[in-house]
Structure formats: structure tokens, C-alpha cells
């Protein structure tokens, strides 16, 4: 894979100057025929289709210190060579993937359209766009050339502007999906209606037969009465038993039909797009350093018809500790007890690694010094959680959360040993893993997905660069799930992984801190950790958009909203459940109204 390195303050780039004039077209160059940075070049073959990738490192200063690209869009811009018609085309693409923002490293995959014309690009560079004001602070220029392909050459060159193309493709796919889904729903509805009519017709026949039988049975005592042979007590008791028996049979048939009709109704609701899992996350830890679960939180979840995803903290001493420690589990058992008391089912247990059990540790940095020792300890911990799930009818166990370095394909054998052990003892337990958004399509991390029951992904802001206001529309926010401000197409990542591995997905985490800037980044600039945040209208707005997005995505079957506790809370747990927050009302009404 190619690798480019740029220094923002030390690299020198000469301006392009006119070199020749042919057919009234100026050809530009720098006089030397190559870029001043001769090591920064990329070469591809005509019609390469998303096969050419490059890693890019951004540095600054004479010591080549990494430049933090967190909060930046890395946009490729290029002007193709001239084609046979003496035309040159623009290629503008936002699909860069940040690999290590703190150390200035990202990955870029060139689209097929970038290799539609052979020759040397008139110009090619990455734009570094700051999200806070959407201004370009630097351009990183490199040489890009496209080799001829005399075997296969049928691509028609054109301008390629990925943000526009993404929106157009979404519209076209939506039209196709709407037509297909409409036909499917019509056929299923027609079948359900025919089945219901058949059952009702059969019930009518059964009722008629029963009445005919009863009429014949009644005829004997009637004849006896006509002959003045009055009923004895024994005759009356026998007749009463017969009537009771027939009535019981008839009631059973009516009950069976009612159950069938309810099953048909539920089938129709599922086909209408209802999600299987609608969770809100709570946390348990032995030290109480996090916003731990409370009885009032459970009461609020009961009021909005949510189920629980429980994050149980697992302790480590630092990012290289190979021996994670499970807590005594007392608070987890308390949460399970509240779950049963208030009839709020637990859907998933999701252990998080945290230094001293604190959930502020960036788990993507976790790299134990003893890998084999870590997997042995982690496997034993997961087996205990699997037992807890089975004992308490909890259907899903999450095997890991954003352990980016540990989900590399080279560790697959360790994961398979853990998975095989769990499945041998608890075969009905569903297994997932909470991947980072881009991770589920990173070929160096996807082998584990083959062995899971559900693909899991954590999805967070920033969605938009705007502060929240009541003038924003949900449709505006929905489109951002396909084009976040850091250039990640979350919807495409999910669909690509699900279709590749033929599995459904759940959002293992999603939510926002309730502030005016809460949709712009994970921890917004206006968040005050002392005073907290309570702009629940912001979370309500995100929920409306998210739920409509989830309803339409055929691959996603559930979510776990983050979080019941601060700072991501979407309600004040000290408030009585009679006073639901705007976000709680959206959650509740979306379930009751059949949106999710």
C-alpha cells in the first residue's frame, strides 16, 4: 500500500507554470517534470475500481511532529489528464478514513472514476478542512499518474463529486427499495388476509356443526317432556356436563383464532419496520466512579417502554495490563433485581475495560503486554457473563467494545476459542462486538465478524457542523448518517458489512450530550462537566432523525441508546416519571406509534 508523508510547515511546493501550448490549451508543470516532493506520488492503472489505497501522514515542524487531524475533513481534489476529446475532469471525494487522528494518519481509497483517463494528473492534492469554521487550512499536493490499460478500456470519464453522487445514489436506491418493499408488503398482506378469512370461515363451519350437534342432543329431552316423561336429576346432570364440555371446546377454538389474529398483527408490525431491540444503556461498577444505575433510572425506562443494555465495568491498571479484573458483581445483581421488579427486561450485557473501573478509558489504545494471558483472562470473564445472561434470560452478550488493536485478524484464533467455548455451553446466546464505525469495513479487522450472530457498531456525532435550533429539519440530520462531517458514511459501512457477512446489525451505542452543540462532536465545546447539560430538545431531535433512519435500514434490527446517566442522559432521573422530558416523549411515542 502506498504511503504519503507531508510536513505542513517545512514542505516547499513550487507553483505550476505554463510549459507548452497545444491546440490552444496551456499545459502546466513546475519545469522539472516532477513535483518537488518526488517521494509523494501515487500511480494507478486505468479503470482500477477502489483497489488503490494510500496511507497519509501529516506532520509539522522541523522535528516532523505529528499534526492532530481530529476535527478535520480530508478531501481529495484532482484534475484528470486530457482524454481523447481534449477534456479534463474534476474528481472531488470525501471518503478518507481517519486511522489515528492524534498522530495525523488517515487512509484514502481512490474511487474508480479517478482512474478513468490515462496520463498524468494536471493537479492532485488533499484539502485539510477545519470543521469549526469549514475553512481549508492547507493543501497537500502530490503526483498522480494513471497507466494505460490496452486490455480493458471501457470506462467513460466524467466529473466525480462524491457528496453529490452519494445523495443521488441514496435517492435512486430509495426509489428501488420503496417499489420492492411496497410489492412485498402487498403480497404479504394479501396472504395474511386470505389466511384470516380461511380461519374465520372454518370457525363458522365449526360453530354451525356444534349447534347442529347440540340441537340433536336437545331433541331427546324435548321429546321426553312432550311425552310427560320429566327429566330426572341424573339426566339433568349428564346433560349439563355435555353442554359444559361443548362450550369449553368452542371457547378454545375462539381463543386459538384470537391468538392467530394477534400473531398476524404482530407479523404485520414487524414487516412495517419495527425494531427487535430498543435499549437504553445503564452502567454498573464497584467504585461508583461512573454514572451508575439507580432505581429511578429503571422507573424512567419502564415509563418509555425501553429495555436495558448493561455496561458492567472491568478493571485494568493501565493500557498494557494483561490481567483484567471482573468486579464482585453486586451492583449488576442489583440491576437485575430492579429489572425484574419493574418489568424492564435486560437485552444485553456489554463489559467495558476501564482503568480502576472508570469508563473514560479509550479502549482503542488497549494493548496488553501478554496477549495470550489477556485472552485467557478475558475468556474466563466472558464465560461468567454468559452464565449470567442465560440464568436471567438476557439474549445478547457483547464480547468486546472498541478494542481496535485486539480485533485485528491476527488474533482471530484467540477469539474463536472464546466463542466456541461459550457456544458449547450456552448455544442459544447471541454474540456481538461493539466495533468502531469505520472498523466494520476495515479488512484488517473483519474476520471476527464472520463468527458473530449480530454485527455491532458504536455511532456518535459529529453529524452536522451546525448548532441546534428548531429551524433544523430531521431530513437534514438523517442525510448526515450517510455523510458525517469527518467523512464517514455510517449507513454504507453497516450495509456493506451486513451484506458481506449475511448478518443483521445493532447500534451498540448511539446518542449525544444534550447541549446546543451536542450534534457536532462527541464532547461538544459548550459542555460544562461541573454544571452538566440538560438541553433535552437536542436529544429529542436526534432521536426523531435516528429512529426514522433505523426504520428504513433493512439491516439494522436494534439499538442501545447511550445513556440513562450523565453526561449523555436524556432525562432528569430526579424528576417523577409523570414529567417526561422531550426526548423521553419521543422515545415513548415512537414505540407506541409504531415508528420503531
Image (cartoon, rainbow, N blue to C red):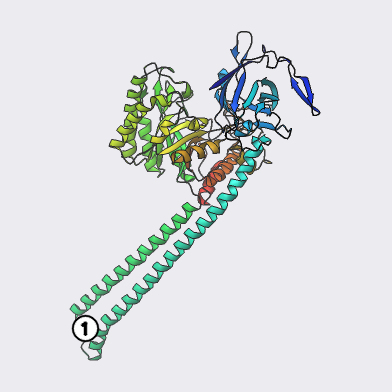
Outermost right residue? 24
251 left or right, relative to 20? left
* Residue named by callout 1: 231
Give the percent coordinates (x, y) of residue 484: 60, 33
Residue nearer the viewer, 596 or 405: 405
Asked whether residue 422 appears in the rendered view, the answer is yes
Is the residue 479 above or below the residue 407 in the image? Answer: below
Give the percent coordinates (x, y) of residue 555: 49, 43
Give the percent coordinates (x, y) of residue 106: 57, 23
Quarter location, residue 115: top right
564 left or right, relative to 61? left
Residue nearer the viewer, 435 or 55: 55
Outermost top residue? 62
Task: Report the number of numbered marks.
Answer: 1
92 left or right, relative to 504? right
Give the percent coordinates (x, y) of residue 368: 40, 18
Residue nearer the viewer, 548 or 176: 176
Quarter location, residue 455: top left
The secondary structure type at the circle numbered 1 is loop
Amino acid at each position: 500500500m502506498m504511503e504519503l508523508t507531508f510536513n505542513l510547515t517545512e514542505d516547499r511546493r513550487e507553483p505550476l507554470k505554463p510549459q507548452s501550448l497545444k491546440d490552444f490549451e496551456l499545459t502546466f508543470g513546475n519545469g522539472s517534470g516532477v513535483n518537488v516532493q518526488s517521494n509523494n506520488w501515487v500511480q494507478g492503472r486505468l479503470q482500477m475500481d477502489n483497489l488503490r489505497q494510500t496511507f497519509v501522514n501529516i506532520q509539522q515542524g522541523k522535528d516532523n511532529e505529528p499534526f492532530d487531524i481530529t476535527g478535520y475533513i480530508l478531501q481529495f481534489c484532482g484534475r484528470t489528464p486530457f482524454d481523447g476529446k481534449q477534456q479534463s475532469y474534476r474528481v472531488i471525494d470525501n471518503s478518507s478514513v481517519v486511522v489515528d487522528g492524534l498522530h495525523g494518519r488517515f487512509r484514502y481509497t481512490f474511487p474508480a472514476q479517478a482512474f478513468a483517463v490515462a496520463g498524468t494528473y494536471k493537479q492532485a492534492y488533499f484539502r485539510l478542512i477545519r470543521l469549526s469554521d469549514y475553512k481549508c487550512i492547507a493543501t497537500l499536493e502530490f503526483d498522480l499518474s494513471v497507466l494505460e490499460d490496452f486490455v480493458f478500456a471501457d470506462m467513460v470519464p466524467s466529473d466525480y463529486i462524491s457528496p453529490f453522487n452519494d445523495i443521488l445514489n441514496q435517492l435512486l436506491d430509495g426509489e428501488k427499495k420503496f417499489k420492492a418493499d411496497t410489492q412485498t408488503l402487498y403480497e404479504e398482506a394479501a396472504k395474511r388476509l386470505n389466511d384470516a378469512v380461511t380461519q374465520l370461515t372454518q370457525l363458522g363451519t365449526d360453530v354451525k356443526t356444534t349447534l347442529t350437534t347440540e340441537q340433536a342432543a336437545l331433541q331427546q329431552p324435548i321429546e321426553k317432556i312432550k311425552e310427560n316423561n320429566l327429566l330426572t336429576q341424573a339426566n339433568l346432570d349428564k346433560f349439563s356436563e355435555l353442554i359444559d364440555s361443548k362450550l369449553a371446546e368452542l371457547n378454545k377454538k375462539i381463543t386459538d383464532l384470537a391468538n392467530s389474529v394477534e400473531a398476524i398483527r404482530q407479523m404485520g408490525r414487524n414487516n412495517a419496520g419495527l425494531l427487535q431491540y430498543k435499549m437504553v444503556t445503564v452502567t454498573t461498577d464497584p467504585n461508583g466512579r461512573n454514572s451508575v444505575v439507580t432505581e429511578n433510572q429503571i422507573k424512567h425506562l419502564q415509563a418509555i417502554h425501553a429495555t436495558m443494555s448493561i455496561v458492567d465495568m472491568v478493571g485494568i491498571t493501565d493500557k498494557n495490563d494483561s490481567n483484567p479484573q471482573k468486579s464482585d458483581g453486586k451492583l449488576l445483581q442489583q440491576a437485575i433485581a430492579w429489572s425484574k421488579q419493574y418489568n424492564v427486561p435486560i437485552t444485553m450485557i456489554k463489559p467495558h475495560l476501564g482503568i480502576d473501573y472508570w469508563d473514560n478509558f479509550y479502549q482503542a489504545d488497549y494493548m496488553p503486554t501478554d496477549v495470550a494471558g489477556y485472552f485467557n483472562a478475558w475468556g474466563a470473564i466472558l464465560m461468567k457473563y454468559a452464565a449470567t445472561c442465560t440464568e436471567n434470560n438476557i439474549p445478547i452478550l457483547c464480547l468486546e467494545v472498541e478494542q481496535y488493536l485486539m480485533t485485528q485478524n491476527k488474533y482471530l484464533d484467540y477469539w474463536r476459542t472464546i466463542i466456541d467455548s461459550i457456544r458449547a455451553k450456552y448455544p442459544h446466546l447471541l454474540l456481538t462486538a461493539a466495533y468502531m464505525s469505520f472498523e466494520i469495513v476495515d479488512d484488517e479487522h473483519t474476520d471476527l465478524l464472520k463468527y458473530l450472530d449480530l454485527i455491532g457498531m458504536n455511532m456518535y456525532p459529529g453529524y452536522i457542523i451546525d448548532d441546534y435550533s428548531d429551524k433544523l429539519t430531521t431530513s437534514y440530520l438523517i442525510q448526515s448518517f450517510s455523510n458525517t462531517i469527518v467523512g464517514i458514511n455510517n449507513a454504507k459501512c453497516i450495509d456493506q458489512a451486513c451484506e458481506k457477512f449475511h448478518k443483521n446489525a445493532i447500534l451498540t451505542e448511539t446518542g449525544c450530550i444534550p447541549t446546543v452543540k451536542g450534534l457536532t462532536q462527541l464532547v461538544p465545546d459548550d459542555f460544562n462537566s461541573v454544571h452538566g447539560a440538560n438541553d433535552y430538545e437536542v436529544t429529542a431531535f436526534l432521536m426523531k432523525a435516528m429512529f426514522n433512519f433505523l426504520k428504513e435500514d433493512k439491516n439494522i434490527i436494534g439499538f442501545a441508546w447511550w445513556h440513562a446517566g450523565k453526561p449523555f442522559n436524556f432525562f432528569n432521573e430526579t424528576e417523577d416519571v409523570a414529567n417526561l422530558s422531550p426526548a423521553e416523549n419521543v422515545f415513548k411515542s415512537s414505540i407506541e406509534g409504531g415508528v420503531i
